[in-house]
Image (cartoon, helix red, strand yellow):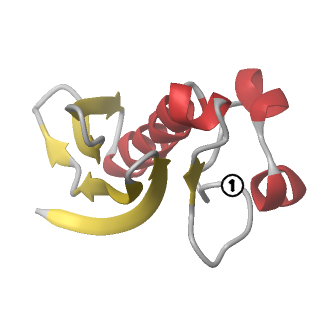
């Protein structure tokens, strides 16, 4: 079940394109919890998941993986990805090892 969605904007030569980030409810898989997510890049849907000891850990790790995927993208490196109305950044928690990549509000509010 979908529990949340954020729509980012990708600036292209032909205009702005929405990039939907969808986060799904963690599911108990008996020995661990799985939390799926999708990033709707215009050229290909990125589907992945994070696993945790409980639902909250799986959810948190999925959000961190989303941050890594967004900040690791060519669209971010080229300055073509944004979260409209929110300034710079995408609003997902970044693992400590990637915090040097943060921009805007993400960098300001990261703890």
Q: Residue 96 falls in which quadrant of the image?
A: top right
Q: Residue 35 falls in which quadrant of the image?
A: top left
Where is residue 45 shown, x and y percent of the image? 19, 36
Q: 108 or 60: nearer the eye?
A: 108
Outermost residue to the bottom: 85
Query: Is residue 110 shown to the viewer in this render?
Result: no
Outermost residue to the top: 97
Q: Residue at x 25, y 44 (%)?
A: 38
Where is residue 98 shown, x and y percent of the image? 72, 25
**Residue on which the image places disc 1:** 89
From what the image shows, is residue 3 above or below residue 64? below
Q: 27 or 13: nearer the eye?
A: 13
Q: Residue at x 15, y 46 (%)?
A: 27
Answer left or right for 83 relative to 66: right
Query: Is residue 48 shown to the viewer in this render?
Result: yes
Instruction: Count every numbered label the image shows and give the total.
Output: 1
Where is residue 6 shown, x and y percent of the image? 40, 66
Q: Residue at x 22, y 55 (%)?
A: 24
From what the image shows, is residue 74 above or below residue 5? above
Q: Residue at x 84, y 29 (%)?
A: 100
Query: What is the crowding at mark 1: few (fewer than 14 residues within 10 Å), some, or many (at least 20)?
Result: many
Where is residue 10 shown, x and y percent of the image? 46, 51
Q: 22 or 60: nearer the eye?
A: 22
From what the image shows, is residue 76 above or below residue 6? above
From what the image shows, is residue 24 above or below residue 99? below
Outermost residue to the right: 108
- The quarter of the rendered structure image containing the N terminus is bottom left
Disc 1 is placed on an element classified as loop
Answer left or right for 108 relative to 45: right
């Amino acid at each position: 079940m979908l529990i949340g969605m954020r729509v980012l904007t990708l600036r292209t030569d032909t205009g702005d394109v929405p990039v939907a980030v969808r986060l799904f409810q963690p599911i108990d898989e008996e020995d661990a919890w799985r939390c799926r997510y999708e990033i709707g890049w215009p050229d290909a849907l990125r589907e992945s998941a994070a696993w945790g000891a409980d639902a909250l850990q799986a959810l948190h790790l999925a959000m961190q993986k989303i941050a890594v995927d967004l900040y690791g993208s060519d669209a971010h490196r080229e300055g073509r990805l944004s979260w409209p109305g929110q300034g710079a950044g995408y609003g997902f928690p970044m693992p400590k090892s990637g915090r040097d990549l943060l921009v805007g509000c993400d960098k300001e509010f990261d703890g």
